[in-house]
Image (spheres, helix red, strand yellow):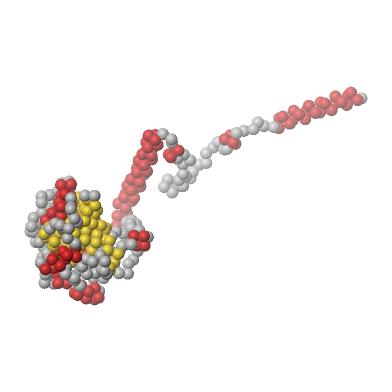
């Protein structure tokens, strides 16, 4: 009996092992465990409204520089194509709607997001009109005086600065160029007043390149100091016209909205005669954008009733105001009305002073 019972127990154990092996299944990889059928996206959902997932692969992971550059250019091209396709789609929708189309959205720029300045000038303000009638430039705007400008340089000017001064003298009527000859500005100013000059303009240079401009209104000031950059003479301009004529040009002043900008605009306007000669068709433009003053000099001609041809005569340059001083130039005891402090005033990109 003992032997029979022992054999029965062994048979039972073998049957249990067979059952356990049948129940056990081979382990699958995590990829096999995932459902093989893809999730179907709803057909009614637009492609633009579908969520866009970031790619797992980044172009910056490519070690080869040339291959990385090619992949990046392909990515930019695809992005540009998608942007153009979206623009065409919006344009077709607007054409289909016609007059019922919604107004175009205004793009955000630094200019229209500008922080409001309390000193913004209202042209109809009585206080501003009173200041204009009593400031240093009132005699010019009342046509009691005519501008006469003396242009000089720093000591030992180089050829580029000298040519720049000569070309400025051809733009500003009744302007005269004199060399400095080591004289201090405090000695030059009384001589200018005695000879009935209304402006003293000093062009400074650094490393043979013009980099500063001092503009002093005579006899009572004010004096403005500018940083000069981006100077391009007439020979350096492409498709430039012939040299300017002796006609008095028109003056255009753009975006001088604050009290400080308004006073600077009047200072620039008083450089030129009050009565322009439209026969010459010459225009001097001072355009203020983000506190940078861009100067351009053009000649225009009317092609027909709708088209106007413009020809740049040069030179061109950019000004950045550094300080505005009351009275004539005095570096030691002068009273400054406004001084540009870069670390304090340039804390916000949306705040402008002119």
Q: Quadrant of residue 191?
A: bottom left
Between 18 and 323, the residue placed more toward the observer is 323
Tell me: 66 left or right of 14: left
Residue at image coords 33%, 58% = 110
Q: Quadrant of residue 189?
A: bottom left
Q: Residue furthest front?
A: 182
Between 321 and 17, the residue placed more toward the observer is 321
Quadrant where the C terminus is found in the figure? bottom left
Q: Quadrant of residue 149?
A: bottom left
Q: Residue furthest right?
A: 1
Residue at image coords 17%, 58% = 182
**Count of numbered badges drawn on the protein:** 0
Between 54 and 191, the residue placed more toward the observer is 191
Tell me: 7 left or right of 298: right
Residue at image coords 22%, 69% = 327
Residue at image coords 24%, 61% = 225
Confirm whether residue 6 shows in the render. Answer: yes
Q: Residue 144 location, x and y as percent?
A: 11, 72
Quadrant where the N terminus is found in the figure? top right
Q: Residue 108 location, x and y as percent?
A: 34, 57
Confirm whether residue 262 shows in the render. Answer: no
Tell me: 339 left or right of 65: left
């Amino acid at each position: 009996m003992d032997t029979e019972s022992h054999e029965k127990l062994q048979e039972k154990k073998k049957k249990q092992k067979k059952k356990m092996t049948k129940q056990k299944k081979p382990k699958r990889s995590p990829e096999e465990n995932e459902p093989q059928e893809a999730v179907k996206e709803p057909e009614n959902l637009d492609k633009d409204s579908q969520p866009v997932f970031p790619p797992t692969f980044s172009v910056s992971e490519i070690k080869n520089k040339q291959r990385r550059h090619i992949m990046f250019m392909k990515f930019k091209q695809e992005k540009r194509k998608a942007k153009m396709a979206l623009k065409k789609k919006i344009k077709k929708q607007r054409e289909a709607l016609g007059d019922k189309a919604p107004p175009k959205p205004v793009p955000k720029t630094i200019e229209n997001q500008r922080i409001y300045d309390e000193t913004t000038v209202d042209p109809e303000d009585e206080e501003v009109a009173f200041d204009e009638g009593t400031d240093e430039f009132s005699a010019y705007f009342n046509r009691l005086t005519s501008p006469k400008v003396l242009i000089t340089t720093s000591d030992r000017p180089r050829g580029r600065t000298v040519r720049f001064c000569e070309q400025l003298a051809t733009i500003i009527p009744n302007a005269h160029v004199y060399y400095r000859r080591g004289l201090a500005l405090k000695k030059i100013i009384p001589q200018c007043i005695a000879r009935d000059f209304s402006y003293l303009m000093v062009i400074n240079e650094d490393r043979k390149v013009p980099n500063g401009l001092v503009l002093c209104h005579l006899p009572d000031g004010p004096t403005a100091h500018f940083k000069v950059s981006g100077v391009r003479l007439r020979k350096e301009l492409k498709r430039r016209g012939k040299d300017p004529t002796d006609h008095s040009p028109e003056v255009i002043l753009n975006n001088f909205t604050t009290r400080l900008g308004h006073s600077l605009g009047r200072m620039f306007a008083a450089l030129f005669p009050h009565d322009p000669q439209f026969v010459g068709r010459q225009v001097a433009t001072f355009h203020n954008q983000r506190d940078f003053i861009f100067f351009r000099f053009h000649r225009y001609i009317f092609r027909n009733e709708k088209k106007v041809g413009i020809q740049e005569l040069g030179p061109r340059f950019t000004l950045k105001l550094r300080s505005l001083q009351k009275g004539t130039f005095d570096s030691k005891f002068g009273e400054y009305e406004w001084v540009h402090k870069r670390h304090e005033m340039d804390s916000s990109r949306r705040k402008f002073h002119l």
